[in-house]
Every structure is written in structure tokens, then in C-alpha cells.
Image (tube, rainbow, N blue to C red):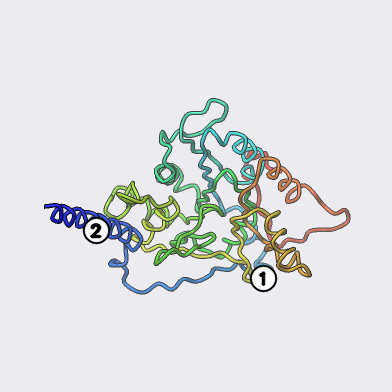
Amino acid sequence: MLSESSSFLKGVMLGSIFCALITMLGHIRIGHGNRMHHHEHHHLQAPNKEDILKISEDERMELSKSFRVYCIILVKPKDVSLWAAVKETWTKHCDKAEFFSSENVKVFEAINMETNDMWLMMRKAYKYAFDKYRDQYNWFFLARPTTFAIIENLKYFLLKKDPSQPFYLGHTIKSGDLEYVSMEGGIVLSVESMKRLNSLLGIPEKCPEQGGMIWKISEDKQLAVCLKYAGVFAENAEDAEGKDVFNTKSVGLFIKEAMTNHPNQVVEGCCSDMAVTFNGLTPNQMHVMMYGVYRLRAFGHIFNDALVFLPPNGSDND
């Protein structure tokens, strides 16, 4: 009798473990059956300056007006100091920026998602943005409140990208068979990708609200799972030299690492000149970045950028 009970318990345990593995692998590998061809990951690079110089003055002006980026920042009440810093700094350079909060917060204006779950917040924010702004903005940028973004560099990177194509850009990470864009560095979706994503949000078999019965996967992985079903794949964004432009660390940390690993090439070994994002910043570091990126100028030095992105009407960006 004891032997039979022991065997039964072992069977239950082994069966549970097997089911757990199937559940986890099912969510990681989801969407492969619908793929018509093998998608090779590739790296997308920013346009070179020579190509920009070939564009006429009128075309440049039209380009500067046509690029419209809507910024989504997901926040929670505990992030209130970061929230304030982001609102006072880089989000002024978005064509429109809105904060999506897990609950109502009186001190700041935000759209209440009424959930503490980051994946549900992300889903709701994307649906809200697409339903309300799909005809007004062609690129949608999502970030954490610890991220600092240089929106002009983002627009420059996107210059030759067609938003009517399914782009899903940022700092890519590979996890098993799944390649996804890390939320730590910010996520960029074209309006076409937003359209495809929103068509799946109501289909739990393809884009579930929960990542798994036993192990919950992160919101950025869950987004990648849904987008793969829609035929949209993660692309790593790089400059002309192959350096990442979406960064998951702060400038200070990059410099520290460069001093250790490349002591004779600290600047060259650190970051891209056309970096779009840095992550892991404190509120004070946000303001320091704002000073360095937008306000500090060398007297007598003239900047001759071939293209200028004009701020939206009524903007108080600096």
C-alpha cells in the first residue's frame, strides 16, 4: 500500500513538472506554426549623413514636419519623483507624451489603467494610443520612467523607415527561440505594427492577457509573443558603426565599463554619438542629461545638421 501511494505521488509530481514545462515552452515558442518562412534577425542602421544632404531643402522641411512620435510612459505611484523628472525633461520633445498609471494619482495628470500588472498596463496603453491617435502619429515609443530619450535622434534613426511597414525596434535580447525588444531601452512600434498588435489583443489564443499558468514571463517578452503571431519581429537598432542606439544602462555605467575594458578608448568604447536612449537614471541624472544634451553649447561652434526636427505647435521643449 505504501509502495502504491509512493508511486502515485511520484507520478503526480512528474506529471505536474511535465505540464509546467509544456506551458512554459508553449508560450515561448508560440506562433511558429503560423510563420510562412524563416525570419532571419537583422540589424537596422541609421541613415548616413551623405544621403540626407542629397535631399532638397523643401523635402527636408516636409520630412521634419511629417515625423510624429507619440510617447507612452508607464508609471506607478512609487515612481512619482521619476515621473516628475521625465515630465520636466525629455518628454517635452515628443510630439505628444502621455503617462499611463497603475492607479489614480492626484499630483500628476495620467490615464488610469486600473491595474498593477505591467503587461496589462502595456496592452491597455497600446490599445488606447492606437484607438485615439492612429491617424495623427506614425511612430509610438514606449518607455519606463527610468529611461532618458533623445527624441530627435529617434526621428533621425527612423528617417528612412516606412511606418506603413511592421517595425518593432529597440535593444534586442534573445531568450531561447524568442527574440524581443527590451523595455529597459524603450520600444518603438510603427503604426502598422500597432494596427497588427491591436487586431490580436482580443484573441487570447494568440495574445493572452496572462503569460502562463505557472511562470509569468515579462511584459516585453509577452509583447514579442503577440507580435510574432502578427508577423512582426524584433529588430536591433544600431548606428553606422554597429553600436547600439537603444541602451539599457546609464551613460555613467557605460563610461565606467569603458574605463575598465578600454582604458585607451573610453569615448570610442562607450556609446554611440547618435544614442536614442539610456536607462537606469535617477531624477537628478535626468536633469544632468537634459543639460548636457540640449543646453550646453561650445561658443563659436556652429552645428550644421542637415535636417532639423521642428517641435510641435505649443510645445515648451527646450
Q: Picture coordinates of residue 42 (x, y %)?
A: 50, 71
Can residue 111 be seen by looking at this rendering? yes
Q: Picture coordinates of residue 281 (x, y %)?
A: 64, 47
Q: Picture coordinates of residue 257 (x, y %)?
A: 69, 61
Look at label 2 and name its amino acid: Leu
Q: Picture coordinates of residue 81 (x, y %)?
A: 62, 35
Q: Earlier in the sequence, mark 1 or mark 2?
A: 2
Report how far apart the C-alphas of labels 1 and 2 lie in the structure: 65 Å
Tag 1's secondary structure? loop
Q: Nearer the viewer, residue 138 or 150?
A: 150
Figure quadrant of residue 39 = bottom left
Figure quadrant of residue 283 = top right
Please report the residue visible at 53 percent of the width from the left and 65 percent of the height from the top.
236
Task: Kindly identify which numbered label has been placed on residue 54.
Answer: 1
Q: Is residue 209 above or below residue 41?
A: above
Furthest-front residue in this view: 2
Q: Is residue 88 above or below residue 126?
A: above
Q: Is residue 192 left or right of residue 110?
A: left
Tag 2's secondary structure? helix
Q: Which residue is mark 2?
A: 14
